[in-house]
Structures are given as structure tokens and as C-alpha cells.
Image (cartoon, grey):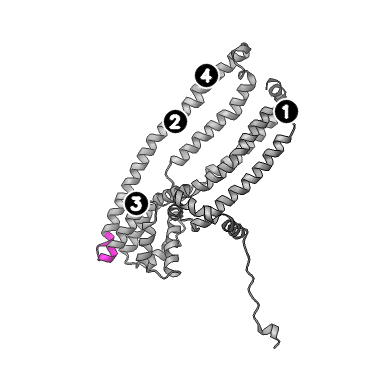
């Protein structure tokens, strides 16, 4: 056997682009990253968000991408200043471009907080049903290890499944016992309800209490809290409907009256006329409706089984309606009127 065949081939190590970016960022911004982590408590927020990234690496990445965006923004600003365009347009573009690095930095800074809220909402929306599952498994005498293993594979849950996978990782990879892994997860979790449920479950097992009775009581409390949330959500819906009526009916009528007066009396306002009415009808009013729908969607409690059909229909019908409206403008010659009044 040749010497080349006797030596096993060394495995190829593939370096990801994100790892290379993190290495460069750490070499350049590790010092300021430590101060940012302490100033904004990124270590605590990242742990609560469950991002699975080292805080110093995250802060260095944030500073590096902000630095790159600043350089690109400076390049674009220089080209805009040298371009032969009106001065007012230059000022507007430069102001918007100058905000880009700030928006990048703020986005990175607030991303853990948004993930914390998302993690809390996802777990609390599935928690009553998961408590029912735990009570059923406890009544059947299933051990804790099997409960974690089954919960990590449940397809009906999404947020709870990720939490169970974290517990399973700590048990199988770091050698923790299941109760300790559950305690560590509960202590560093943003949801108070989930934390109380897990800690009470662990304490009941360790003290030899009645697990079935504890879980049944907790399940009733969680469903009662869920019912209260639905009642509050119904009250909020009436407020959203009133807001939509005020914007889409009352405010729209007032705007149309203003547009009509501006058409008859041009001196009544420089933003009136048929062109402004078209912009308001086809751009401003639909955007306000979409904004109200988005607020309503975010305020509703999420179900364990997502309903995607309305979003699919919206993704199909919205572009189709825009294409149809533009086609009608060109077929009927309406674009000439629009071009003449703007």
C-alpha cells in the first residue's frame, strides 16, 4: 500500500461568509463591542431572545456592517453632490442617505428586543395546549425524558418545539439532567407564564407532589387567561373599526371636498385638484387600509396552527389588481388625464 493511500485524506473545512465577516469584525471592533454590550445589556437581551450568538460577536458584526454602510453612504452622497440635479433634490437625497447608517445601527440594536417579544408571543399562544399535553402525558405516567423527546418532535407546535429542542440539546450535548435543563431554560425565558409553568412542574417532580393535579390546575388558569385575552382583543377590534371608519370614510370625505374646492378655486390650495385626488385614492387610502390591517393582525393572538390562506390570496390579488388598474389606465387613455393634472 502506498504512503498516499495509507494516510487518510484530511476533511475539507468550509468557511462560511458569515464566519469570515465575524472574524474581520472581531479583529477590527472587539474593543468598542465590549463597551456596547455593557452599555445596552446585549448579553441579557441575546440570551432572552435565544439567538445563540456570542454578544461580543453580535456587537462587532453590528459595528462592522454599520461601518460598511457608512462608507457606501459617503460614496453615494459624494456622487449626488457632484451630479447636476436641482439643489433641493440634492438636499432631500443626502438627508435620506445620511440616515442609512443610523437605521442599520438601530436595527441591529433593536433586533434582540423584537426577537424577545416574538419568542414570548409564540410560546404563550401555544402554552395552554402544551399544558394540556403535559397533563395528558403525566396522567399516563410518561417520564420527563420521554416528554421532552416527544415535545421536541411535535409538528403541531412551533415555538414550544424549539424550546423543547433547546432542553434536549442541553441534555444530550452538555450532559445535564432533564430537570436542570428545564430550570435553566425557564430562568432565562422572557415569558412569565412559561417560566412559572416549567418551574412549578420541576418543583412538583422534585418534591414528589401530585403532578397531574398541578398540571390540571395550571391548564385551567392558562385557558382562563387565554379567554381574557380574547375578550380584550374583541374590545380592541371595535376601536380599530372606529379608527378605520374615521380614516376611510370621514377623513376621505373631507379630503374629497377639499380636492373639489381646489379644482374650482385654484387659489384655495396648491395640493388640491384632480391629481391629488387620484394620488390619495390609489396610494394614500390603500396604504392606510393596509396599515390598519397590519395592526389588527399583530394584535390578534396567534394560534398553534397558522392560517396562511388569506396572505396567499393577498399576494396573488394585490399584484393582479395593480396590473389591472394600470392596464385600464392605458386602454381607456386615463393616463393622459393623470399626466396632465399632476
Marks 4 and 2, Cα distance to the nearest angstrom?
Answer: 19 Å
Image x and y of residue 219, in percent = 31, 53
Marks 2 and 1, Cα distance to the nearest angstrom?
Answer: 36 Å
Q: Secondary structure at mark 1?
A: helix
Task: Say which residue appears at 34% left-offset and 51% top-offset.
Answer: 193
Image x and y of residue 208, in percent = 25, 66
Residue 331's mark?
Answer: 1
- According to the picture, the residue beneath numbered tag 4 turns out to be 254
Classify 154 as above or below 82.
Answer: below
- According to the picture, the residue beneath numbered tag 2 turns out to be 241
Image x and y of residue 272, in percent = 61, 18
- According to the picture, the residue beneath numbered tag 3 turns out to be 193
Task: Say which residue appears at 59% left-offset and 25% top-offset.
Answer: 280
Marks 4 and 3, Cα distance to the nearest angstrom?
Answer: 47 Å
Q: Earlier in the sequence, mark 3 or mark 1?
A: 3
Instruction: Examine the structure image and report whether residue 210 is included in the region drawn in magenta.
Output: yes
Q: Do tag 3 and tag 1 residues touch (Cβ < 8 Å)? A: no
Q: Do tag 3 and tag 2 residues touch (Cβ < 8 Å)? A: no
Q: Nearer the viewer, residue 205 or 103?
A: 103
Q: Secondary structure at mark 3?
A: helix
Of circles 4 and 2, which is in front?
4
In the rendered view, does 172 fall on the left or right side of 317? left
Marks 3 and 1, Cα distance to the nearest angstrom?
Answer: 59 Å
Residue 89 seen:
yes
**Could you tell me what secondary structure mostly forms the magenta stretch?**
helix
Amino acid at each position: 500500500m502506498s504512503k498516499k493511500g495509507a494516510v487518510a485524506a484530511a476533511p475539507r473545512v468550509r468557511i462560511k461568509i458569515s464566519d469570515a465577516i465575524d472574524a474581520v469584525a472581531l479583529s477590527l471592533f472587539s474593543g468598542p463591542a465590549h463597551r456596547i454590550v455593557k452599555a445596552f445589556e446585549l448579553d441579557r437581551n441575546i440570551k432572552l431572545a435565544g439567538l445563540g450568538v456570542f454578544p461580543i460577536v453580535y456587537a462587532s458584526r453590528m459595528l462592522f456592517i454599520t461601518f460598511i454602510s457608512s462608507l457606501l453612504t459617503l460614496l453615494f452622497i459624494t456622487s449626488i453632490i457632484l451630479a447636476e440635479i436641482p439643489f433641493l433634490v440634492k438636499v432631500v437625497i443626502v438627508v435620506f442617505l445620511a440616515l442609512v447608517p443610523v437605521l442599520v445601527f438601530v436595527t441591529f440594536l433593536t433586533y434582540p428586543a423584537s426577537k424577545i417579544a416574538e419568542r414570548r408571543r409564540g410560546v404563550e399562544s401555544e402554552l395552554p395546549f402544551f399544558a394540556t399535553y403535559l397533563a395528558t402525558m403525566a396522567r399516563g405516567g410518561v417520564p420527563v425524558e420521554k416528554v421532552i423527546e416527544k415535545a421536541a418532535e411535535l409538528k403541531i407546535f412551533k415555538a414550544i418545539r424549539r424550546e423543547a429542542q433547546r432542553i434536549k440539546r442541553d441534555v444530550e450535548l452538555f450532559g445535564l439532567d432533564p430537570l436542570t435543563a428545564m430550570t435553566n431554560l425557564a430562568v432565562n425565558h422572557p415569558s412569565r407564564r412559561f417560566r412559572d409553568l416549567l418551574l412549578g412542574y420541576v418543583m412538583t417532580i422534585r418534591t414528589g407532589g401530585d403532578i397531574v393535579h398541578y398540571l390540571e390546575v395550571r391548564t385551567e388558569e392558562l385557558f382562563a387567561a387565554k379567554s381574557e385575552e380574547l375578550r380584550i382583543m374583541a374590545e380592541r377590534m371595535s376601536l380599530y373599526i372606529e379608527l378605520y371608519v374615521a380614516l376611510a370614510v370621514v377623513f376621505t370625505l373631507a379630503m374629497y371636498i377639499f380636492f373639489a374646492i381646489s379644482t374650482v378655486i385654484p387659489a384655495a390650495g396648491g395640493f388640491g385638484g384632480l391629481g391629488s385626488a387620484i394620488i390619495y385614492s390609489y396610494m394614500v387610502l390603500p396604504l392606510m387600509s393596509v396599515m390598519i390591517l397590519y395592526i389588527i393582525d399583530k394584535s390578534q393572538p396567534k394560534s398553534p396552527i397558522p392560517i396562511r390562506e388569506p396572505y396567499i390570496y393577498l399576494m396573488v390579488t394585490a399584484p393582479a389588481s395593480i396590473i389591472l388598474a394600470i392596464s385600464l389606465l392605458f386602454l381607456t387613455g386615463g393616463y393622459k388625464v393623470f399626466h396632465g393634472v399632476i
